[in-house]
Image (tube, rainbow, N blue to C red):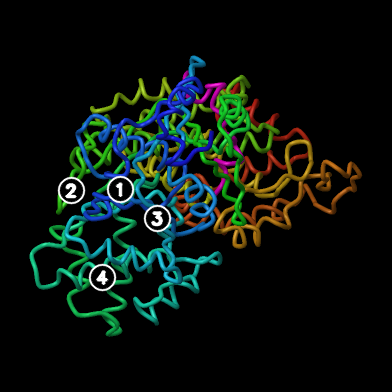
Amino acid sequence: MKLNNYELFLPENSEKWLRAGISIPKFDRKALIERTNKNPAWVHFGAGNIFRAYLARACDALIETGEYDLGVIAAEGYDYEIIDMAFIPHDDITILVTLKADGNVEKKAIACITQALKASSAHEDFERLKDIFKTESLQVVSFTITEKGYSLQGPAKDISQEVAYDFENGTEKPRSYMGRIAALLYERYKRFADEKGGGVALLSMDNCSHNGDKLKAAVSAFAEEWERRGLTEKGFSEYVNNPARVSFPWSMIDKITPAPHKDVKKMLEDGGICGMETIVTSKNTHIAPFVNAEEAEYLVIEDSFPNGRPPLEKAGIIFTDRQTVDKAEKMKVCTCLNPLHTALAVFGCLLGYTKISEEMKDADLKKLVEKIGYEEGLPSVTDPVIIDPEKFLEEVINVRLPNPFLPDAPQRIATDTSQKLPIRFGETIKSYKNRDDLNIENLKFIPLVFAAWLRYLMGVDDDGLSIEISPDPLHLYLNSHIRQVKLVGVAAESADDQTETETDFDSTNPIDYRTRIRPILEDASIFGVNLYHAGLGEKVEALFGELIDGRGAVRRTLKKYLYNEKGI
């Protein structure tokens, strides 16, 4: 069997799909597509794994139960090969494989995505997106495009060339991601400028603090700059900044959706399903016609939608006020999950792990995330009430991260770490600075993670072998400071070349590394604070010095501070 509209709904195939363990939709997909094309209500940018595994699944569930009768339109604005290779050949249908911690597996065909578009201003699909943005029915434009998607900066931390081009040239053929979003919103403004309608919610669902504000700041920058230059009609900026017309709700999303795994592919193929190959695009996106994900999921959204919204609360999604979203987001992103993920990512890469679940069998690494979560994180958390922080953390450490059936990798999580640190750790540091009941001098494992990240950026593991650094938008900037720092007494080797030479690194001269890492530690855009002003800079320096002290220094340093309660 092939995963496409014809074979999925062919009556004589229903028994075959059942034997393969795949639940297939019971709704009329052709009618769904027709209704959605005529009255689109929800467009989602970022056609990746979490969209298909969570948001599309939730929409699918509503349609199945008759609570909703429109699909969701997917748009991809970064890696267009995803549309060509993972969506179009399968008529925009995907298979969700839920890998439960108890070993049970659920497989379901998700068929609520009615169209998949390339959000490129150079592609004909952009005209379709313009038409969608002009429709009165449009309610929600949502995003899972990662933290870097909202940035207007380039690799050298200055304004990117694409953004500079768009500022100068306006809405006609924008090149930057946020420029394209602003241009599409301008189409909506022109359509409804003289009317009371035209409300829409731009909903970020990415793992960054106050994500709605980040999206708003980026879109507003374009609206204001274009209007200042006379490239748009006057009033566009006011429209964007009027929450009664355009809202930017905050949200907190949580569901682990690793890259497609070969064991899941084999499981599906053994069930008789063809064409389940993993796709690696030219931009190094790993995607497949299926998505494998954990069972646990949380989505909390600020209920601010000027033109209404789908009834997603009936699919288990929580709608609440902004203050509660903020508490839930800080609880998860800043304390109880994402910081632990980042700690496991950098230490896992340094210590040779390729699976998060295997790391959780390492007593030292398990103890590390317990220290970060229970001892350093939880005291700074404000209880959101809708989710119990301690129970959430317990589930993360004892059920979710150790799940042996969830093939997540530290190398995946290490991607874009520079964009994650200010949220995953910076907010906790600010709490320790600003609250009388917390003492920043008690932090030692968060500084250890910072030092380990710098050690990871050297591209050498704990055995002195070269490792590949996961992509990061600040790679050039970071590498300009780190590249001359060497592992004491050891030249970097590759796994294929076991020869080594002594380096000329002077381990007795701390200037060799302290002066090179200081500009990074001072950078509040990376850590959320200037670490020296926060009282942690020198501590991170000292820890980094220990981590580069020859082969095995990562493990030695980790053990030293895990089991030495006297502190750093």
Sequence order check, earlier mark of 4 and 2? 4
For the residues bearing labels 4 and 2, Cβ distance under 8 angstroms = no
Question: Which residue position is annotated with label 2?
Answer: 304
Q: Which residues are magenta?
A: 397-415
Asked whether 80 or 369 is in front, the reply is 80
Asked whether 312 or 340 is in front, the reply is 312
Q: Is residue 551 left or right of residue 225?
A: right
Sequence order check, earlier mark of 3 and 2? 3
Residue found at the very far left of the displayed protein = 196
Cα separation, mark 1 vs mark 2, equals 27 Å
How far from the left and from the top, in percent, is residue 445? 53, 33
How far from the left and from the top, in percent, is residue 144? 40, 48
Give the answer, above or below, for where 223 lies relative to 552: below
The reply to whether residue 139 is visible in this rendering is: yes
Question: Which residue position is annotated with label 1?
Answer: 33
Please tell me whether mark 3 sits on a helix, a strand or a loop: strand
Q: Quadrant of residue 149?
A: bottom left
Residue 398 is a magenta residue: yes
For the residues bearing labels 3 and 1, Cβ distance under 8 angstroms = no
